[in-house]
Amino acid sequence: MEKNKFRCLLLLLTALGIYSLENHYVTKLIGSFNFVYVVKPFLWCGLALAIYLMPVLRYKSKLRTRNFINSWSFIFAVVYFSVQFLAGLVDGFGKSPYEHSPVGIVINLVTVGAVLIGREFFRSYFVHSMTKAENYKVLLTISLLFTILAFPMKKYMDLQGYESIVKFTAQFFLPEFSENVMATYLVFLGGPIASLTFLGTLEAVNLLSPILPDLQWITAALVGILTPVFLFTVMQSMFEVESKQRRNSDVQKEGHLSWIMTTLAAVGIVWFAVGVFPVYPSVIATGSMEPMIHPGDVILVRKITDIKEVQVGDVIQFQRDDIRISHRIISIITKDGVPSFQTRGDNNSAIDSELVSPEQLRGEVINVVPHIGWPTLLMKSDKDIPLDEIEF
Amino acid sequence: MKKKILVIALAMAVMLMGAGYAYWTDQISVDSVVGTGEFDVNIVKVSDGGGDRNPGKATTNWEKYMKVDTDFVQGTPTKSLNATISNLYPGSVAHLSFDIENNGSLPAVLDSINVDYAAITGSAIVDEIYYRVDYKVVQDGVQVGTPKHYIDGVGLATFESKLNTLLSGITLEPGQMLIIGDPVDENGQDLENKYTFELPATVVNDDDCENNAFELSFQMNWKQHNDQGSYKVD
């Protein structure tokens, strides 16, 4: 065991060394093309060969379940990219940035494949040196390590400001982490072949498909974070049944499908409430729009994407300082090609004193749900509302 | 139990990200070359401004200056850019330049640029405006290669095709930056007194007077480079 841990440390230092080279000025000296397409694949293949020549470590699964694991690794990869493509039907597709000439495809498959083989052999040796039994600390630590090494150092250093950090974490880091959790678990069960089947299928689709889903970062977060982790939980249960550690009836009681639906519903409800979707809810606090909207009603607001859609007579919601006001458009004033909106509450005696500029516009009120906003108003009743902003 | 904790933790992270998305997002999904973890080319800086070719000339028509507004937010890399050029009058000038950086780990080739334009007021303006676009490629602040001179023309109808002639095929290594719009000479040295847009003082038709405006949107389409043959910047 001690020898294994020593070899493990050596391999870790080698992997970190390759990562450092990638981020060092050495790549500029030899050219990033030469590094990416020649040196790096060669180094990772060398590492894979070294691991292959080392004493074999035992995997969790027995030989008779290997086919089961490898088959399901492939099926889960298909499920994962299918979910991504389904999401692409909503958000749209873009041209793949990867080279699709025959030579380009071969170069990509060889270089990506070589790096992937090296990484998965390394992952397998690392996991099996650290633990013989299922160990979440090891699983998550190794997944985190592989996630950090997946991105160039420059990517981390270029992150400026809260927004770019959140976007990077949502769109790239956590999905990569989620995939690594799945890959690490597969490697624990069935060695590098299992994780290569999963990740290799995904990479092949990425490289070969002429179009790829061009997801907004929030959609990429939803699909990329939750799909692999759900697949991981399903794989775990399936393996336990297949290896007779648990009975099928016990696993069915867990209700994976109901877990997935519950999680998606919870995410959907929270996202609807905070305004991710094109329609969002808003609670009304005053009676300025009676009789159409009463205090305690919840209005459904549709986000406006084209300012030309807005017409006189529409009820719009706009932001004024810290509060949102929903009033009807009385007239539209255009200056230098830019429209501004004059508004008034139906129940107000006077027109609003300030014009609404396009930047203040939030959306158009499309529906009213009576009374259900009262709990929110009661919870917020101790907060100071700037009443001098509200005109009567 | 532990796997349930993992699922719940990640689901809560996704929920919180939704709040951030709702707070930060403007609409408009753009048909684009998709970005992956390794492939990442973005506009990272935009500089803009307007001025007068002959400041101090005594005429009331020259009290307003051509203005350039963009939707770029400093510190937020983006793959597309919308610009509005307004308050035009004969003799006004404006510059618009943007820096594009390859933040990925693969060399990238500029496949094409899509440029859409529309007059906001005064449709004749899009036919009268003079444009000039230069570029240079830099790495760590040092210029790389010798760029082509520049493209110029009158009227936005030819803008997109000329821009593509100038820029398509340019390869950016990881870490390199393409600066478009800053006026430079054949050696890439900064030029004084040159601007991206100019409404020539010779334009005297009443239809092209002040307060005209137009908008431009730039969409860059980058793709992977793994063919060692053709580097455009030599």
Image (cartoon, rainbow, N blue to C red):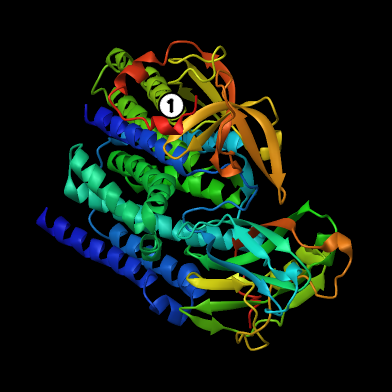
Name which residue lies at 38% across and 20% down.
Answer: A262
Which residue in the rendered view is the most extreme toward the left?
Answer: A2
Name which residue lies at 42% across and 25% down.
Answer: A264
Give the answer, above or below, for where A102 lies relative to A67: below
Q: Would you identify the image quadrant in which residue A226 lies?
A: top left
Q: A35 left or right of A229?
A: right
Give the answer, above or below, for where A98 lies relative to B47: above
Q: A306 left or right of A263?
A: right
Residue A316: where, in percent of width, then height? 59, 29
Name which residue lies at 29% across and 59% down.
Answer: A51
Judging depth in this view, the residue of B189 and B144 nearest the camera is B189
Give the answer, above or below, for where A13 lies relative to A213: below
Q: A282 left or right of A306?
A: left
Residue B22: where, in percent of width, then height? 46, 38
Residue occupied by mark 1: A273
Residue A63: where, in percent of width, then height? 31, 36
Q: Would you identify the image quadrant in which residue A242 lies?
A: top left
Judging depth in this view, the residue of B43 and A183 nearest the camera is B43
Work out which quarter of the rendered image holds the N terminus of chain B and state it.
top left
Which amino acid type is marked by label 1? Answer: Ala
Q: Is residue A73 visible?
A: no
Name which residue lies at 58% across and 73% down.
Answer: B179
Describe the element under mark 1 as helix, strand or loop: helix
Q: Would you identify the image quadrant in which residue A274 lies?
A: top left
Judging depth in this view, the residue of A221 and B189 nearest the camera is B189
Work out which quarter of the rendered image holds the C terminus of chain B and state it.
bottom right
